[in-house]
Image (spheres, grey):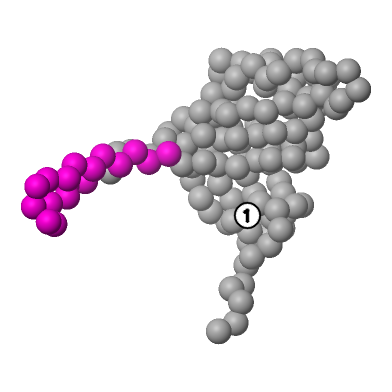
Amino acid sequence: MPAAAGAHVFRNAVVTVDDVEYANQLTKARLVPDTPIQTQRTLVPDGVVQDVDSTVWTFEISGLQINVAGGLAKALRDAAGTQIEVTLQPKAGTGQATATFTVLALMPEFGGEQGNWLTQELELPVVGLPVFGLST
């Protein structure tokens, strides 16, 4: 059996927030689903009852903390408490997989440790569900 097509290393991604590209400031950008499953086992050998709840999504980002115009940290700080639109495309180019979604902007970190890059790490709650498609 041949290797699966479409596998690639995560680099040369596209991450836009309110139509501004920020991939050059990020080291991590991923959508993470959380789907709670309730399981109840009964006393009979095959007695299992399960309920699958609605999926809640989180957008996890890590990267440089750039606190001036053009920086994602500044943009998030300016938009804190409001909803912003994000597009995540793991591989640049036409016909590539994309996810478009809305997140609630949260305050990023500010400052850091002497001698280290200023970085930020956030888990932004997704409002509703992502829309998956292909880039044009």
Residue at 60% in and 82% down = 2
Q: Which residue is drawn at 51% across and 34% down?
A: 58
If the image is split into quadrants, where does the C terminus sit?
A: bottom right
On screen, residue 23 above or below 96: above
Residue 68 in picture, x, y percent from top left: 83, 19
The answer to whether residue 120 is left or right of residue 46 is right
Q: Residue furthest right?
A: 115
Query: In percent of the image, x 76 and y 52: which residue is there?
Result: 12
Q: Which image quadrant is residue 66 in? A: top right
Choose top left, top right, bottom left or bottom right for residue 8.
Answer: bottom right
Camera-side residue: 88 or 7?
7
Q: In this view, does 18 lie above or below 112?
A: below
| One can see residue 22 in this view | no
Q: 17 above or below 88?
A: above
Q: Circle 1 sits on which residue?
A: 135
Work out whether residue 67 can be spotted.
yes
Badge 1: few (under 14), some or many (20 or more) residues near its Cα, within 10 Å?
some
Q: Position of residue 18 (x, y in %)?
A: 65, 31
Relative depth, front residue between 121 and 80:
121
The residue stretch that appears in magenta: 34-51
Number of numbered markers: 1
Residue 8 is inside the magenta segment: no
Q: Nearer the viewer, residue 86 or 27?
A: 27
Q: In this view, does 13 lie to the left or right of 52?
A: right
Q: Which amino acid does label 1 sit on?
A: Ser
Q: In the orientation shown, which residue stands out farthest toward the left?
A: 44
Q: In which quarter of the image is the N terminus?
A: bottom right
Looking at the image, the residue that sits furthest to the bottom is: 1
Say above or below: 31 vs 79. Answer: below
